[in-house]
Image: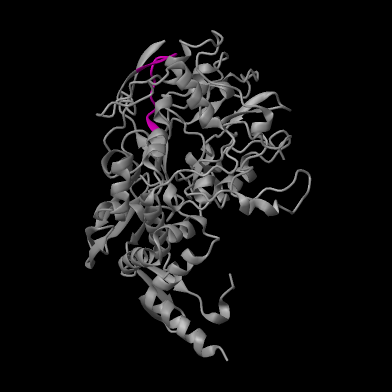
Amino acid sequence: MPYDDPDPTDPSVLVGVPIPADEEVHRETAAAFSSEFAQLGYNETMIHYLFTNPFYAGAHRALQALGDQAIREIVREHATFWENVRIACRASTNSCKSATLVVRSMSQEDEEETP
Amino acid sequence: MSEVYNWQLGRDMSYPYEARFPERQFAFVFNINRCIACQSCTMACKSTWTFSKGQEQMWWANVETKPYGGYPRFWDMKILELLEQANPGGQAWTADGQFKGQTIFEAAKQTLISESARVLGYLPTDEEWNSPNIYEDNPVGPKGVRNTFHATGESLPVHQTWFFYLARICNHCSYPACLAACPRRAIYKRPEDGIVLIDQEQCRGYRKCVEACPYKKTMYRGNTRVSEKCIACYPRIEGRDPESDGQPMETRCMAACIGQIRLQGLVKMADDGRWAEDRQNPIYYMVHVAKVALPLYPQFGTEPNGYYIPPRWVPRQYLYQMFGPGVDQAIERYSVPDRELLAVLQLFRRSNKIIYRYEIEEGPMVYEGKLNGRDITLYNDTVIAFGRKGEELFRTNIEEPIHVRPHEHANSI
């Protein structure tokens, strides 16, 4: 641990300082976030859910700043693009298909399994 | 002082020694857009090289949160401020990408530092070294009270949130400031791979290198009274690691990267210090052809050999300061990658062997549509990586299978 608490008069120490950002920053944050998770095989619904979770501070702030409709459009664009090359394989069924479709079918199974 | 050519600045600059260039140069590309600060690289390095007594504060590889954090704390803010004081308002680039300000070697001549220093720099305090990542992502609590944090943290103003993780190791610079500053000439750059090392027999612990390195990647060890630094895992680079089977292998921090943000290589050097054209080398391609990867703080003048794909969401003024000119072009190309770039990006972390060359076999079109407002066509190409002797290391497709575990084995290894 440091010897002393942060000195609030030290300009190098950013304690509770809001950093300026414009709409474009939020838009790019949302795009980068959507793109990287889509590359991991997440589908539209799953990525959108992450935006609603305050744990993902940047993405959540983008949702607050841009609104739900704008975020859904960004998520859809990236999910649509990457679902063409992220192919999921399921050992149990020995089948491979679009990751998005597999995740959707798994969600349905979960719902069916839930008593 | 000699005049040497620094291609990152687009001009000649002053350097205490004449230019000497290795046959190949250790270089790497980090894709910041993908880094999640898991610190796997940090711990891989720590557990390999700096786990001994006297090395507790040493993190040759670290990941820091920008713009808040740094290891040592404020390292970049402090050196930027020193340069600004030496050359007020003059640290800028021309429209055609030439740096018209002063490097740390040039600014040293105009500031009141000791004659022996040779390089503009400063010595971080012990406190700045001893707490990497303090006050970064984590909520902090009262001093001396463990496992708690300030409950009133939510009263802080709302951040217009942007931040990113900056993974760093020694840049094994072409014009190392540590080497220039050493009065004992204990620091040298290897002719075969450009790795910068400190001769532990020659070093007397004057800490001129610690003061001079603008990236603060040389560190003093109190119990041996000499300085140490990242050695680029040279036994692995030489192929002497038992795992490597005689083939050059990437460093521990690269191999441990679960986010697959890292690719490392050995680029061919020309006699004049520029990179020799090697079109099919993935590092050369990303730095000199696609130009998606940029050096960290090129204005310092050391010609660092670490390159970064800049984070696309960060305000551009901040990125211009950190990566110099070329930021807009790099982000544009990364956001809407062309066919070749998309294939090369698949090479990251598919193997721990160093890739010397790649080839692309064209595949079928799988998608045609828009991305980021631009028309884009996606092909399922195959990219093939080759090693030092031209042997195939691996081949991978753009189309990547994701293996979904059955429910009953969801957590099995």
Compared with B384, A20 (above or below) is above
Q: Position of residue B193 (x, y in %)?
A: 43, 32
Q: Position of residue B73 (x, y in %)?
A: 60, 34
Compared with B271, B25 (above or below) is below
The mark tally for this picture is: 0
Which quarter of the picture shows residue B78?
top right
Q: Nearer the viewer, residue A76 or B240?
A: A76
Residue B365 falls left or right of residue B131:
left
Residue B153 in view (yes/no): yes
Main SS of the magenta part reads: loop
Residue B302 in view (yes/no): no
Q: Nearer the viewer, residue A23 or B125?
A: A23
The residue furthest bottom is: A115
Residue B407 falls left or right of residue B321:
right
Q: Considering the image in quadrants, where does the N terminus of chain B appear?
A: top left
The residue furthest top is: B115
In the image, which residues are magenta? B13-24
Q: Position of residue B13 (x, y in %)?
A: 36, 17
Q: Nearer the viewer, residue A95 or B148?
A: B148
Compared with B149, A74 (above or below) is below
Q: Which residue is depicted at the point 71% across and 48% down?
A: B141
Whether residue A44 is in magenta: the answer is no
Q: Position of residue B376 (x, y in %)?
A: 23, 60
Colour mapping used in the image: one colour
Residue B220 falls left or right of residue B111:
right
Q: Nearer the viewer, residue B7 or B350?
A: B7
Compared with B15, B384 (above or below) is below
Which quarter of the picture shows residue B219?
top right
Q: Considering the image in quadrants, where does the C terminus of chain B appear?
A: bottom right
